[in-house]
């Protein structure tokens, strides 16, 4: 297939399922090339991701698709904006169309140079992706690890740990968004103002207070954990136990945390509890250093930080 036979056009929400399907083809192929076989029920996974994909379909900064001569999608790239942050959320080309310049054409539209005060990408270690992202003005800042394991903590364990640190926890709704925004502002510098309604609607939102003052939060759902943020990195041990207990109470047999590897508190705590690193690692890339990712666990599935 020659490059000329591929058309690049703006995406619409009607492209969501086809974009998801080609993304899964690219992800499964990527994992296989890295020695990992992932058996996933595509429809079930799509259903779990649904609210997030619907949100990105309507609240993106740029979303472009590459269409083959038969009208089928062969690639897509999408970005979002949060204040001065410009973040690439997805960048995928179907395996049978890779390495032919389609990615280059998509990224020029979806992640144009010069846009965003802070440019960020959660990136695979795919060589084509890496070459593209360096050309797009970003550099690898640190690796991120998917930490997977069986949740074992009981509510009693979590409560004892909380008492020891003087923390109270409550399940919040969107009325508490300002408290979450203040913590986001302090930790990453970019509150998720437009995203909070979707996050509160689709995930349980745990807000941790010390002497009444909000100091940390964790979003949790059965289809993905995060983001998790703490003003004091040392509070994360207690919070991770609370999330583990939340999942154990719901009978979940395996959970994953997407951990910035500069977050040594979370890495050591989870490794110590028997969680395992699921390869391959990913890379957190940006045009300049920002945020305090030693006290942060990413949104999962890992489309955005
Ligand atoms: C990443 C991806 C979207 C890129 O799309 P693509 O159409 O295959 O990429 P392109 O053909 O445009 O090539 C991109 C660049 O990589 C370069 N490249 C290829 N192999 C390379 C290597 N080993 N080292 C350095 N650069 C390399 C190419 O020369 C090209 O640069 P150029 O345009 O300056 O010539 C696609 O390969 C893909 O879907 N990969 C698997 C999924 C993935 O990892 N996605 C990224 C998610 S964060």
Image (cartoon, rainbow, N blue to C red):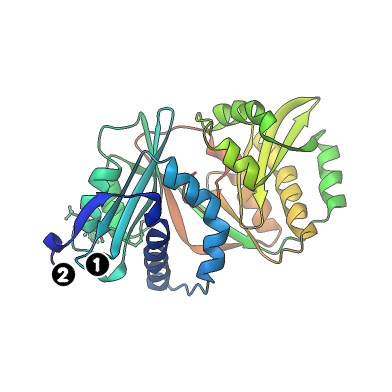
The answer to whether residue 263 is seen in the rendering is yes
Residue at the spot 78% in from the left edge and 28% down from the top edge: 210
Q: Secondary structure at mark 1?
A: helix
Q: How many marks?
A: 2
View extreme (front): residue: 14
Residue 135 in view of the camera: no
Q: Which mark is residue 1?
A: 2
Give the x, y percent position of residue 123: 40, 52
Residue 181, position in %: x, y? 59, 28
244 versus 200 height, above or below: below
Residue 80's x, y, as percent? 41, 40
> Considering only order in the chain, which callout, 2 or 1, is on the residue closer to the N terminus?
2
- On-image quarter of the N terminus: bottom left
Q: In whole angstroms, how far apart are the C-alphas of marks 1 and 2?
A: 8 Å
Tell which quarter ligand 1 is in: bottom left
Which residue in the protein does label 1 denote? 97
Residue 99 vs residue 204: left or right? Answer: left
Image vertical order of residue 26 relative to residue 167, above or below: below
Residue 81 image offset from top left, x and y in percent: 41, 35
Is the CB–ligand 1 distance for label 1 below 8 Å?
yes
Query: Where is residue 160, by image quadrant?
Result: top right
| Closer to us: 153 or 57 | 57
Q: Which mark is residue 174?
A: none
Name which residue lies at 40% across and 41% down.
60
Residues at badges 1 and 2 in contact (C-beta under 8 Å)? yes
Label 2, secondary structure: give it: loop
Q: Is residue 174 left or right of residue 304?
A: right
Left or right, residue 4 beside residue 29: left
Q: Residue at x 85, y 45 (%)?
A: 159
Asked if 241 appears above or below 128 in the picture, the reply is above
């Amino acid at each position: 297939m020659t490059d000329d036979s591929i058309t690049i056009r703006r995406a619409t929400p009607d492209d969501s399922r086809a974009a998801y399907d080609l993304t899964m083809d690219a992800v499964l192929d990527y994992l296989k090339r890295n020695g990992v076989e992932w058996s996933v029920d595509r429809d079930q996974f799509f259903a779990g991701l649904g609210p997030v994909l619907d949100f990105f379909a309507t609240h993106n900064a740029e979303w472009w698709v590459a269409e083959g001569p038969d009208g089928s999608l062969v690639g897509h790239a999408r970005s979002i904006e949060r204040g001065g942050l410009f973040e690439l959320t997805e960048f995928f080309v179907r395996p049978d169309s890779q390495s032919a310049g389609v990615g280059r054409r998509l990224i020029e539209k979806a992640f144009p140079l010069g846009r965003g005060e802070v440019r960020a990408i959660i990136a695979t270690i795919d060589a084509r992706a890496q070459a593209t992202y360096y050309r797009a003005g970003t550099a690898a800042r640190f690796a991120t690890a998917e930490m997977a394991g069986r949740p074992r903590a009981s509510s009693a364990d979590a409560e004892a740990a909380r008492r020891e640190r003087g923390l109270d926890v409550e399940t919040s709704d969107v009325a508490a968004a300002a408290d979450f925004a203040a913590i986001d502002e302090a930790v990453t510098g970019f509150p998720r103002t437009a995203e909070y309604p979707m996050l509160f609607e689709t995930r349980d939102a745990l807000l941790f207070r010390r002497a009444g003052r909000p100091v940390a939060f964790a979003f949790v759902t059965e289809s993905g954990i995060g983001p998790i943020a703490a003003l004091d990195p040392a509070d994360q041990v207690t919070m991770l136990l609370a999330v583990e207990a939340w999942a154990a109470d719901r009978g979940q047999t395996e959970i994953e945390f997407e951990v910035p590897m500069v977050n040594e508190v979370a890495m050591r705590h989870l490794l110590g509890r028997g969680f395992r690193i699921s390869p391959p690692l990913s890379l957190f890339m940006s045009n300049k250093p920002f945020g305090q990712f030693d006290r942060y666990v990413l949104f999962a599935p890992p489309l955005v930080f």
